[in-house]
Image (cartoon, coloured by chain):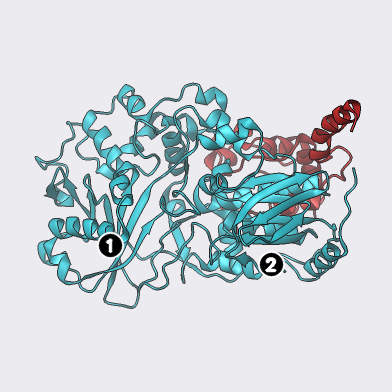
Chain colours: A cyan, B red
Amino acid sequence: MTYTASRRHLLHAAVATSLSGLTGGCSRSNTGRKVLVVGAGLAGLNAALILERWGYEVEVVEARDRVGGRLWTLDHVPGSPEGGGNVIGANYGRVIHTANTLNVPLRTPPRTLPSDYDIGGQRIHREDWATSSYNPLPDGWRATPPGRLVGKLNDDNPLLKTRAWHDPGLMATDQPADRGLRALGFPEAAIHLINANNSYGNNLSDTSLMALYRVMGEFGRLSGPALAVMEATAGNMRLPEAMAAQLTQPVATGETVKAISQSGAGVQATLNSGRTTEADAALLALPVPALRQISLDLPTSQQAAMAGVDYHKIVQLHCVVDAPFWEASGWGGSWWTDGLLGRIFTRPIPDSERYNMTIWINGDSCDLLNALDDEACTDTILQALWKLVPRAQDVTSVGQLVRWTNDPFAGGSWALWGPGRAGSAHAAIRAPAGRLFFAGEHTAEAYRGMEAAMESGERAALEIMRALT
Amino acid sequence: MSRLIHHIVLMLIPIALSIPTAQSEALSGEQLYDIACEACHSLGSAPDHRVGPPLENLLDREAGAIEGYRYSEALRASGWTWTLPTLLAWISDPDMAIPNNAMNYVNALTAEESQRLAEWLLQQP
């Protein structure tokens, strides 16, 4: 089979090669091939930059009116808090290198204020946690703060030694996390607290124990200063913006793909605007809920794997606080609760007297809130906050409500693999299907979060370059 | 269209949809390095902002020997020296080669690509 590249494609490839990509400096010939990248988050942009570097013409289409996907710096809120991906790990090599190369400054985040507890409706000072009569944990467990209970998994974590967390052999031992924790000797009170703010599943019955091991294994392998995290000084969105600015063809924003068909000659995408665009291959760098909205004609097994992936639910209310109302009462400023408010992270806005306060609610607790309109949802959260700390009312204003589950282009914050499911679904979902390729954090092997997106873009670019040399 | 032609066309569809890789030109060592290594390693000699150590002059270098890098204890204590067999084992499956290492990398290359990459890396000055 031969490919014919149109004259237009060749011209674009010539331009792409004449402008250097991230590294430049090498002589890379035009391939005369064109790749359509759907989704301008970190995964799609990283793949696009690699492909341009090696002489491919790349067209990136993005449904939102901005690049960045699940990175969303709230630039309109004082302090520019992160509504999406917020943490750059010290071992996020691709993110850090790309930021350094593109002059996107990174910094150590301002320190989050100390957290007190609100458990069963009782407020507990952080220094009283171990001895408080409201601490529900049994002896031997009482000194562990609620947020660190899940870390006890590292006493016997098979994933401290391997990154192959979705290996079918390991997955054969997987089970629902609540059952697994019980079998490991975690007391019911600890399981209740872990479930209250579990970032790695919507409830512990549907959470894979192996997925928890994976996260804890990642933390366990890092230690000391290596655990320090970073953020982009002017907001994490500056990274995908800088990446997009490197592309020869600007990202086409506000362009939702409706369908992609493929033939022996290439792929054809139909956009909601009615426009069609053609390429030699397409990379779908989208979260699975968004992917499911596109007509793709995939193998049945791949469709089934995609249908079975759940996404994590997060509701955030980003507030700005004018004065440290917590100080008069001796509270630290942040809270960890087992109620509607979930966790409250407060940190100072640099060079300001004010604070960013993010109320961060995880998992199935979001269902009630996601069913409300923005105003009612915001009001419900605020009423709970005034009840917890009445003084907050006088000095706190709302910046932005963020609901990833209700966002049609995300459908949630990150992919969740139900107990035992990752062994088969992970590989099936990302397998190239003819001229269609897949990227996004849900397809990554080694990392989670932003680095997973970057990692997946590399792997997808590799697959496309293999197929279209 | 006769039934025979119809059948032949149906049989050809899967072939047309699969992209030929066997006759494709293989990716070069430089390309593989750019995709798989370059974000975390440089080809220089001095420590830089990247999370992994520089890979200059790798052939016969002792593993975990560049000053200024936070290697895992496992790699430092491995006694490994970088040659084609050790480098190939390492990049193919780091966890299998030296358990408890700090390189968070899952290899997406084929065996042939890993071989080509390892050979190319060891040829770099």
Residue beneath disc 2: A247
The chain under label 2 reads A
**Residue A87, how many percent across, how many down?**
44, 56
Residue beneath disc 1: A375
Residue B42 visible (yes or no): no
- The residue at the point 72 percent across, 40 percent down is B109
Image marks 1 and 2: residues in contact by CB distance under 8 Å: no
Residue B92 sits in quarter:
top right
Callout 1: few (<14), some (14-19), or many (20+) C-alpha neighbours within 10 Å? few
**Front residue of A228 and A436:** A436
- The residue at the point 64 percent across, 66 percent down is A251
Residue A61 sits in quarter:
bottom right
Which residue of the protein is positioned furthest toward the front in this rendering? B1
Going from N to C along the chain, the mark reached first, 1 or 2, is 2
Residue A442 sits above or below residue A86 on the image: above
- The residue at the point 29 percent across, 24 percent down is A185
User: Which mark's residue is nearer the viewer, 1 or 2?
Assistant: 1
**Residue A412, how many percent across, how many down?**
44, 48
Q: Horizontally, is B119 left or right of A274 in the view?
A: right
Q: Quadrant of the N terminus of chain A?
A: top right
Return the mark for residue A251. Answer: none
- The residue at the point 45 percent across, 60 percent down is A230
Q: Quote the CA–CA distance across marks 1 and 2.
A: 39 Å
**Residue B5, how many percent across, how many down?**
90, 30
The chain under label 1 reads A
Residue A412 sits above or below residue A190 on the image: below
* Residue type, numbered disc 2: Leu
